[in-house]
Image: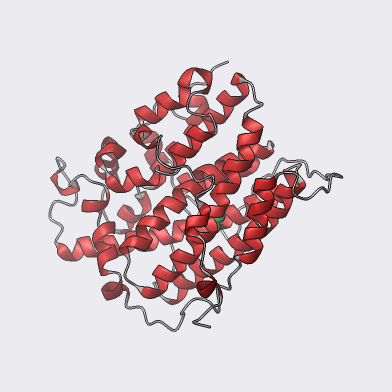
Amino acid sequence: MAKTDRDILGRDSVDDLEAILAITNSDVDEAVHTVQDNAAAIFTWDYEKGARPALNKLYEKAKHSQWNGETDLPWDTIVDPDAALEPFLAAADPRFGVGGDLAMLPGSPVKSWTEKEWREMAMESVNWRLSQFMHGEQGALICTAKIVETVPWIDAKYYASTQVMDEARHVEVFAKYLDQKLTGWYPINRHLELLLDDIIEDSRWDMTYLGMQIMVEGLALAAFGVMHQVTEEPLLKKLLRYVMSDEARHVAFGVLSLKELYAELSDAELRERQEFAFEAAVRMRDRFLMQEVWERQGVDVRPIVKGLIETKPKDDPFQQLLFSKIVPNCKKLGLLDASGGWLRQRFEEIGVIQFEDWQDTGDEYDAFALTNEELQGESA
Ligand SMILES: [Fe+2]
Ligand SMILES: [Fe+2]
């Protein structure tokens, strides 16, 4: 039974402006957020290490690649957010970052913005992005702890346990950077929160992998790559370099594990995975509309968000790159073309299919690995 967009997204069309605007974080002061984790914890009595050689190799690599967020990064760096993030500001400037000139929209609320307002907006959006990455890292921490419990293979449990440590370190370093070097952090974006909740609530172990390792981490790996290239602030650059070396392994873990499972699924089962991947892609696009940042700048959000959703990723280099890992990995898993090419068609609609033949992340992680010198923590 085919699902409609309402079943998948909770709205009748991908670009339904009012439905998107209605999704806001209504409780920014909440101290904890509770989600039901509907999964069975699985013991395995098959302890044969290396039965899945690719996962075993990844596990050995991960043990060798641990770093210490406190001692391996140069926290004594003095960060002047305005000066040090200058090149970053240009890339984060919404006039560049979204590809369309928002000031040109009919009745644009940012028509009369001067350089000062644009700079403020750019700075806020850097802060907002890093904040969302921090929240996403906590999502990854929880998801990989869940994978340790739910995956039935010993090699995967071993590997996932190293990822739990990696994600703790990632939450730690982003939180410290935002707290000590920038001006604090934004609450979680509601679109991102909805996605994380959906991933955690699903009872099927492969959905945790698909949502987190393939979609959320695939996007993060691509976004960190762009930020790492752009920023000249030495602490952030190094932080991103170290986090990316871990993230590349995490995405590989997803690809290697799901490839085995998905080869055995029926078309109907694959269709459910396609729908989940599509939902995740749309939620992640929606989160980058940055509703709450525009709001904080005192702008009428409606015309801005309308302008942004009319800018398809194909017209927007930053948005495009966000999908540059997700699409080839979905292809490698057979998700693009299963069920009559349903996901291929949906990715065409949202303008990201052009990445299908880019390198997938199944074995790309070696290229991201830290050198022995980097691992010796020369700045300790
Ligand atoms: Fe992470
Ligand atoms: Fe990760």
Residue 144 visible somewhere in the drawing: yes
Total label count?
0
Q: In which quarter of the image is the N terminus?
A: top right
Residue name at image x 55 percent, y 68 percent = 172
Residue furthest to the top: 1
Taking the spot 61% from the left edge, 58% from the top edge, the residue there is: 32
Relative to 247, is 157 on the left or the right? right
| Camera-nearest residue between 120 and 46 | 46
In the image, residue 219 above or below residue 276: below
Inspect this view and state whether residue 187 appears. no
Q: Along the horizontal axis of the image, is 168 left or right of 350?
A: right
Task: Give x and y (percent) for residue 90.
Answer: 23, 61
Depth order, front residue of 91/161 = 161
Residue at point 66% right, 63% down?
63
- Which residue is at a point 30% across and 42% down the rendered structure image? 305
Residue 1 in the figure: left or right of residue 156:
left
Q: With respect to residue 30, does 177 lie above or below?
A: below
The correct choice, above or below, for 259 with respect to 229 in the image is above
Q: Position of residue 189 (x, y in %)?
A: 45, 51
